[in-house]
Each structure stands twice: as structure tokens, then as C-alpha cells.
Image (cartoon, rainbow, N blue to C red):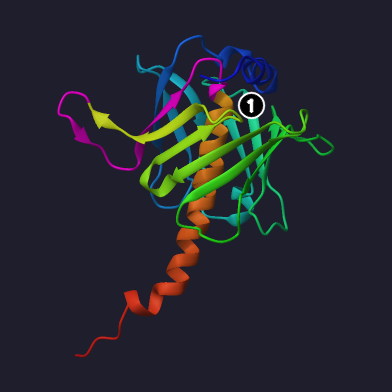
Amino acid sequence: MASGAAAEKMNNEVEDGYVFKEEIHLTVLKTSLFFAGDGFTVYDCKGQLVFRVDSYGPDTRDRDELVLMDPNGRCLLTVRRKRPSLHQRWEGFKGERVDGDKPIFSVKRASILGRSRASLTVEMYDNPGEEYQIEGCFSQRCCTVFNMMKESVAEIRRKVDPTTNVVLGKEVFSLCVKPGFDAAFAMGFVLVLDQINGEDHVDNNATTEPAVHPATED
């Protein structure tokens, strides 16, 4: 559970309506599988739409800025890649970003080395010294967000069909948000993780392509 100070801060950062007194479990569904980060729909345990991110396609320019919306299309949060950045830094803005807006937080790689597993640092600009850490492997849908007290405030996990006990594909996964932590903020992490994971996938393919596609003889 998030500390009292962290919970109070998060209430003011993104959207009060997405901070809950009880742990919530959201189902996140990628709306397209052709490109990394092609959009998402997010549902609660009753099947009601909570968030949506419309498809932004394969164009890199489109993927440098992503918008998290509520079910009615109202912008809750904008995440934007900061260029240039060796640590793949992304910045978050409350609502719909316009020129001149100041970010409220940033997400960056803790190190430029070791890309197979996520290790990201979240810095809160309005509260210097407040940080969150994201640890795990997003490509395997296994990540945990920790506050400064090393307490879990959100988790990304593979989705299991409760009727068959079968693990579903990676296009659908669970986002567990602890009491007091902003679910919109947590979903913003998912957008950034998905983008960084997509970039790593491209880099790895570029590196391994000769081995993956060997020459064949007639």
C-alpha cells in the first residue's frame, strides 16, 4: 500500500476519480498487434470501460506523444518522449499537453545498459526527491512499481482465465493498482513501458536479423 504522503500526492497529480480505497484489478487489452503500442482499452472487473488509448500506428512521430483518455474521450494524461535522451526519458503532462506546459513527472531507464528487463525511475517534478521504481520484464508482462519505501503500489501481470485457469496471450494482461495510488498514473507507466519495449524489440531484431533469416539453398 502506498504511504499516506504518496497517496495524497497522487490524488493531485492526475485524476482524483481514479484513486481508490481498495485494491483494483484492471484488464488491459492491446487493440492491435501489428505494431508496438497500437492502442489500448482498459476494463474494470465488471467489464466497464475505464481508459482508452486510440491507435497511433507505426509512424515514430505519432508514437512520441500518447494520450490516455477516459471512456468519453476526455484527456487525462499525456506522455511525451524527450529527445535526445540516452535513458529513453518520457515526460508526463496532466490532461492534454499544449506548448508551454510543464511536465509533472518523468520516466527514464535507470541505466542505458541491460535492456532485456525493465528498470525505470519515475521522478516527480513538483516534489523533488519523490521517486518510484519500476522493476521487471514488460515483454513478459511481469512488472512491479515500488514507492520510496519499497512498497508495491502497482503490478503488471499475465492474465489468467478464471473459468479455465489458462494463461492468456500477452495482448491481454492485468494491471493491479494498490489502494491510494492513481490508476491513471499507473496506466501512464504501461504506455511508456510498451513504447520502450517496442524500441528494444526493433533494436534486437536489427542485431539478430542475419541469424534469424539465414540464406537458403534451392
Query: What is the tally of numbered marks visible in this picture?
Result: 1
Q: Quadrant of the C terminus?
A: bottom left
Q: Position of residue 186 (x, y in %)?
A: 54, 29
Residue 176 lies in magenta, yes or no? Answer: yes
Which is nearer the eye, 81 or 19? 19
x, y percentage for residue 123?
69, 37
- Asked if the stretch drawn in magenta spans residue 166, the answer is yes
* Residue 191 found in image quarter: top right
Left or right: where 119 falls relative to 103: left
Which one is in front, 71 or 149? 149
Residue at left offset 85%, top offset 37%? 100
Q: Residue at x 40, y 73 (%)?
A: 208
What is the secondary structure assignment of the residue under circle 1? strand
Inspect this view and state whether residue 48 appears. yes
Position of 78 compared to 59: left or right?
A: right
Question: Crowding at label 1, few (<14), some or many (≥20) Cα neighbours within 10 Å?
Answer: some
Residue at far right of view? 100
Where residue 25 sits in the image (x, y, percent)? 39, 21
Q: Give the quadrant of residue 129.
A: top right
Image position of 126 with respect to 109: above or below: above
Residue at (50%, 29%) from the top-left corner? 52
Residue drawn at x 57%, y 55% as measured from the top left = 59
Residue most extreme to the front: 149
15 up-or-down from 30: above or below = above
Q: Quickly name the residue at label 1.
A: 75
Please, which residue is most extreme toward the bottom here? 218
Instruction: Tell me the kind of residue under disc 1.
Output: Cys
Q: Is residue 56 visible?
A: no
Residue 194 lies, with reference to residue 6, above or below; the image says: below
Q: Which residues are magenta?
A: 162-183
**Residue nearest the observer in this picture, 157 or 6:** 6
